[in-house]
Amino acid sequence: MDRRACDIIHPDVLFCGGLHETRRIADYAELHYMPMAMHGNSGALGTIGAAHVAAGIRNFLGLEYHLIEAEWTCTFVRREGAALFDGGSVPLTDAPGLGVELDRDVCSRYLDAGQTLFD
């Protein structure tokens, strides 16, 4: 960013250090007048997290997400009272945390042999 080697920043919440670090990247990009398009290749939970970061930054350009690789990527989290995705948008709520819960039954089905969910 300091050397203007790119025009748009494209971080992924899961690979750049989480929500807080992604926000720090966005703030630094804003100092350099660079927009940020969120990368979202991490299933429904990562996409919801990225949408929360995006909602709080001024230089947000767009959120990439595609949930087609495995049919279960949209089923391992759920939200009461609102769809996870709606016509190309990611509605957010004021529920605690990210506003979603893991569906433990779905998560358990897709664990590798020997892995368990922790409480």
Image: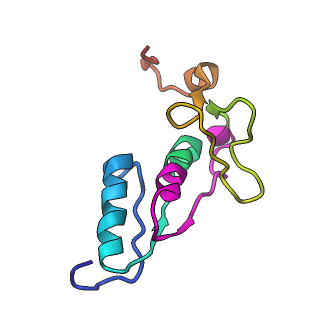
Image quadrant of residue 27?
bottom left
Could you tell me residue 66's position as x and y percent? Answer: 62, 57
Is 80 situated left or right of 54 in this image?
Answer: right
Image quadrant of residue 76?
top right
Could you tell me residue 41's position as x and y percent? Answer: 52, 55
Is 11 situated left or right of 110 in this image?
Answer: left
Which of the two residues, 110 or 100, is positioned nearer the viewer here? 100
Q: Could you tell me which quadrant the N terminus lies in? A: bottom left
Q: Could you tell me which quadrant the C terminus lies in? A: top left
Residue at x 78% of width, y 57% of height:
87
Could you tell me residue 9's position as x and y percent? Answer: 39, 72
Name the colouring of the figure: rainbow
Residue at x 64% of width, y 44% of height:
70
Residue at x 46% of width, y 21% of height:
113
Above or below, 5 against 65 in this view is: below
Q: Is residue 32 visible?
A: yes
What range of the chain is rendered magenta? 50-74
**Of all residues shown, which one is farthest toward the left?**
2
Above or below, 80 against 50 in this view is: above
Is 81 situated left or right of 105 in this image?
Answer: right
Q: Is residue 40 visible?
A: no
Number of marks: 0
Could you tell me residue 53's position as x and y percent? Answer: 46, 53
Image quadrant of residue 23?
bottom left
Above or below, 2 against 69 in this view is: below
Which of the two residues, 12 or 69, is positioned nearer the viewer here? 12
Which of the two residues, 84 or 29, is positioned nearer the viewer here? 29
| Residue 61 is covered by the magenta coloring | yes
